[in-house]
Image (cartoon, helix red, strand yellow):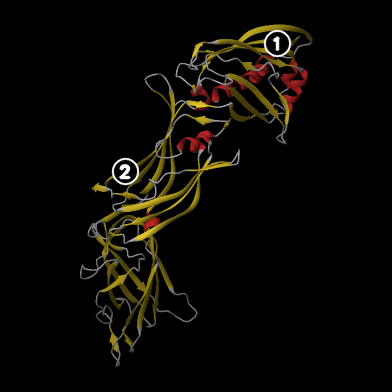
Amino acid sequence: MSVLRRIYLLFLILLLGYACRKPTSASWDVDVVFPVIKSSLNIRNFIGDSIFKADNTGLLSLNVTREITAIKLDSLLNLPDTSIVNSFTVPSPFGITLTPGQALTFFPTTELNFNIPNGVALKRVDVRSGLLKVKFTNDLSQPLDLLYIIPSAIKNGQPLTLAVIVPPTLPNKDTLFKTYDLSGYSMNMRGLSGNVYNTIVQAYTVSLSPGASSVHANYAQGATAHLTYSKIVPDYVEGYFGQQTIDLPLDTARFDIFNNFQAANFLLNSATLNFKILNEFGAEFTSSFSNIKSVNTINNTVVQLTNGLLSNININRATKAGYTIYPSIKTISITTDNSNIVPFLSNLPNKLTYQGKINVNPLGNLSGYNDFAFYNTGIKVAADINIPLRFNASYFKLISSSTVDFANVKQLEHVNSGNFIISALNSYPFRAQLQAYLMNDQNQVIDSLFTPGNNFMERGVIDAQNIVITATQSKLNVPVTKGKIENLKKTKIIKLVTYFIMPTNPPGDIKLFENYSFDVNIIAELNYNVNRN
């Protein structure tokens, strides 16, 4: 449709360009004739070149792929915000006198478990982003040195280490808060024994600061650290993803293939829709999809897809070599033999509805805790559509709009009248009716470019099989009047509508071949007011 749009707008541009002359003191009217454009258009120009392919007979097919839905890592698992309070206090009922550099007592290495739902058991998490927030308190009168080490979290070969001087917490004084960036750390989730999951190891040392004065610490005095691991987004996870069900509630996907395309009594001859499920997760799945409907919101028509192949789909796990993923691909072919795909797509949907569910690891932990997933990967469901351009219809039309503004173009006043003469050689098996509607700022039609009744390109001559054997010549006029020029100044949108009218009672399907075209030659005949000093 883009080429026709350019031709329509070129009419207007030429009116402006030819009218741009230096002001003069004398004037007269002249008639001018000049060529505007010569071009050959085919169906690729109306919809788009890249989505068409021709078979060995030259018959064109529409080939497009559209993503229907996608499930990312955060739908499969997430690490919940996890908090813990660690107290580092004197255990002796008699207290202890601390000298500078002396530790309060021995604090054994401990574990921190992340309570991940749905039976997920992780042994490794590489952190893409995340925060460790810590609130420190110290009820001694002297500063304490706190060394917090997480041997489980490694970055550049070094464990995550927090070294903090915690000042005495005084009445009416703010507690010490610190926030640490966890991005880039790889976390071993196997705990102290190496036999558990979702668990990291943490170690502490608390001592009186070397620059402090000696202080007596009573029983239960010391420091506390309130730690919160928050907003952890994995870059990579490994372990067992559990047995869980991910529901896909009823949803709607935009389907833009037939945008700007409308038809009456439209019926395709054949079509194929391949549902392609691409799994980038290192886990097995089963899935089912239902309520797949073709929705045409313009005509308010709905056609539900009837096919049993989508009710029980087994999806193999992806594999990897290092950081290279080799996804598994499952293809379900929906054809005229196993479904109602022809009326489903003949409905010319601009939306698809669907719902379903995905079961993770339906047979359990087959991988032995070796499920894996990378950030921004997932399960993607796409529709590969092939439609041979062989159909029946009363007519179809293509619609497009362009925004314009001629309100302040004074040069339009120099054109008195005239015509654009369009000579069209049509080798398609249908008539083409052209119109461009001028619409004001209220989105109301105030005029049109083509004269009704003189805006047809006649179809080519067809044989008994509806194949064009001879192209047909037509001539169209686009009149330019003072009234139309005034309406152009009020125009904000030009709505382009092209009707393609099929032969009456054709002997068979209409077929569109690669060699069909509209050959268009446009000449301008204008009466123009010329001024001269």
Instruction: Tell which of 339 and 64 is nearer to you.
Output: 339
Q: Which mark is residue 526?
A: 1
Which quadrant of the rendered structure holds the C terminus?
Answer: top right
Q: Are marks 2 and 1 in contact (CB under 8 Å)?
A: no
| Image coordinates for residue 376, horizontal then vertical, percent | 37, 49
Residue at (32, 74) in percent of width and height: 145
Label 2 crowd (10 A; few <14 / some 14-19 / many >=20): some
* Nearer to us in this view, 224 or 288: 288
Q: Nearer the viewer, residue 513 or 209?
A: 513
Query: What is the secondary structure assignment of the residue under circle 1?
Result: strand
Q: Position of residue 88 (x, y in %)?
A: 32, 80
Residue 462, labelled with which disc?
A: none
Answer with the quarter of the image where residue 438 lies: top right
Q: Foreground residue, 406 or 429?
A: 429
Return the x and y of residue 454 as percentages of the image width and height: 68, 15
Quadrant for the N terminus, please: top right
**What crowding class fits label 1: few (fewer than 14 Cα within 10 Å), some (14-19), or many (20 or more)?**
many
Earlier sequence position, callout 2 versus callout 1? 2
Is residue 318 among what the camera can see?
yes
Classify mark 2: helix, strand or loop.
strand
Q: Could you tell me how far apart the alpha carbons at marks 2 and 1 are, in whole angstroms?
A: 61 Å
The amino acid marked with disc number 2 is: Ile
- Give the residue at mark 2: 329
Amino acid on which disc 1 is placed: Leu
The residue under the point 64% across, 20% down is 13
Picture residue at 55% right of the left edge, 22% below the top: 3
